[in-house]
Amino acid sequence: MAQIKPAAIRNLKRTAIVTAVFLAGIFAASYLIKGQGLSGPLAYGVAIIPGLAMAGLFWSSGKAIAETEDEFMRMLAVRQHLIAAGFAMAVASAWGTLEMFDLVEHVGAFYIVVLWSIGIFVGMIVNRITHGVWGQCP
Amino acid sequence: MKNRLRVLRAEREWSQLDLAQRLEVSRQSVNAIETGKYDPSLPLAFRIADLFGLPIEAIFLRD
């Protein structure tokens, strides 16, 4: 059975923590702002928590790359993340121009994270095709 | 860049996993280097050369 590397375990823990903070932030913001009518600076403070959690996800992802000791696997991870960033920005740019001319519905900017996540899997497929290895699953 | 890694490994009857463990890299790394899909960094190339007791230019060849 394949052994899970310590760096992968650390990344899983970090991802679990930021996901928990994200979910807690979403629930807290929904309850306090939409349910209880919280406003003012405190509302901004609560509403930014899920966003900061997502920033933590990107930090965790970058740290996982830095902690990958195998240089070939690290190179694959870097390629994967470049593809993900390119994919997310390309789709967001195209959608933005279509939206500018009222040809598509408005979509929240936070969906870029979803696009990036899809891009990570696109990167895995590209790695498999070009280098015969999927690379790392986020 | 071409290399003689597969030949050198076969001479010693090592599997890709054996070589990977000796180099402390993944088996996928060894496979990627052998098939020319990945050129190792200079530090890793030196580790490979040291393991086989050969100079780098006896393992990695110019295209």
Image (spheres, helix red, strand yellow):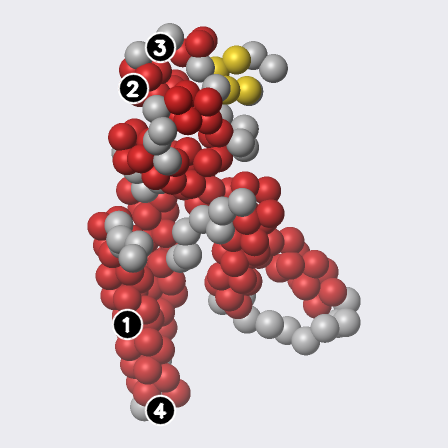
Instruction: Look at mark 3 in the image and give the residue it sits on.
Output: B54
Q: On what subunit does the disc labeled 3 rest?
A: B
* Residue that badge 4 annotates: A35
Say which amino acid is labelled 3.
Leu
- Disc 1 designates what residue? A20
Name the residue located 27 percent from the left edge and 30 percent from the top edge. B22
Residue in the foreground of this view, choosing between A130 and B15: B15
Residue A81 visible in the snapshot: no
- Disc 4 to disc 3, how far (Cα)? 72 Å
Name the residue beneath numbered marker 2.
Answer: B51
Q: Are marks 3 and 2 on the same chain?
A: yes
Element marked by disc 2 = helix
Residue B52 location (% of width, % of height): 33, 17
Residue B38 in the image, given as x and y percentages of width and height: 50, 31
- Describe residue A81's horizontal placement relative to residue A129 as left or right: left
Q: Position of residue B1 (x, y in %)?
A: 55, 20
Other residues around mark 3 within 10 Å, as few (<14) / some (14–19) / many (≥20): few
> Could you tell me the amino acid type at mark 1?
Ala
Residue shown at the point (68%, 63%) measured from the top left? A95
Can residue A90 be seen here? yes
How packed mark 1 is, by other alpha carbons closer than 10 Å (few <14, some 14-19, many 20 or more), is some
Q: Earlier in the sequence, mark 1 or mark 4?
A: 1
